[in-house]
């Protein structure tokens, strides 16, 4: 069963189904056109370089700052308090370099 909002106007089901199929057909033409443009002039997708911390380093960090401390620092609503909490954690982590 599918329910489609049609502006509170009642229309015969056959008319709605015909409209859906026609819209799908037109959309396929538009999608093909977009794909053609992208193939001709589209630029390469941006490459993502992960900034993830290596697992070993992350485990060492958790020994210094517990996940609970980190969560509390990051998810504090007050901006000034949050920034201060993060600064304290950053200081803890940089002391051990």
Image (cartoon, helix red, strand yellow):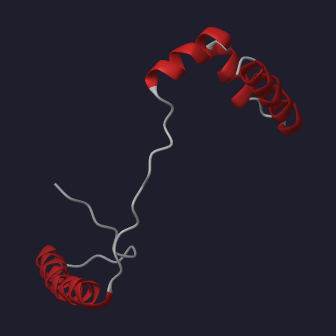
Q: At x 40% / y 66%, what residue is drawn?
A: 46
Q: Examine the image and state in which quarter residue 70 appears.
A: top right
Q: Which residue is nearer to you in this view: 93 or 2?
A: 93
Q: Which residue is nearer to you in this view: 53 or 96?
A: 96
Q: At x 42% / y 55%, what residue is drawn?
A: 48
In this rendering, the answer to whether 80 lies above or below 1 is: above
Instruction: Examine the rendering and report whether any part of residue 88 can be seen.
Output: yes
In this rendering, the answer to whether 28 lies above or below 62 is: below
**Percent of width and height locating residue 93:** 71, 21
Q: Tell me how many marks there are.
A: 0
Which quadrant: the N terminus? bottom left
In this rendering, the answer to whether 69 lies above or below 81 is: above
In the displayed structure image, the side of residue 84 where residue 32 appears, left or right: left
Residue lying at the far front of the rendered structure: 97
In the displayed structure image, the side of residue 32 where residue 52 appears, left or right: right
**Percent of width and height locating residue 68:** 64, 14
Instruction: Examine the rendering and report whether any part of residue 75 can be seen.
Output: no
In the displayed structure image, the side of residue 84 where residue 89 appears, left or right: left
Q: Which residue is nearer to you in this view: 95 or 25?
A: 95
Q: Examine the image and state in which quarter residue 33 appears.
A: bottom left
**Percent of width and height locating residue 32:** 18, 85
**Percent of width and height locating residue 73:** 74, 25
Which quadrant: the C terminus? top right
Q: At x 20% / y 58%, what residue is drawn?
A: 2
């Amino acid at each position: 069963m599918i329910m489609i909002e049609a502006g509170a106007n009642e229309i015969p089901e056959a008319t709605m189904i015909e409209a859906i199929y026609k819209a799908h057909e037109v959309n396929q033409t538009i999608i093909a056109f977009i794909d053609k443009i992208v193939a001709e002039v589209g630029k390469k997708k941006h490459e993502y370089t992960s900034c993830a911390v290596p697992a070993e380093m992350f485990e060492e960090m958790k020994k210094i700052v517990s996940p609970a401390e980190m969560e509390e620092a990051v998810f504090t609503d007050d901006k000034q308090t949050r920034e201060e909490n993060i600064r304290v954690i950053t200081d803890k982590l940089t002391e051990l370099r």
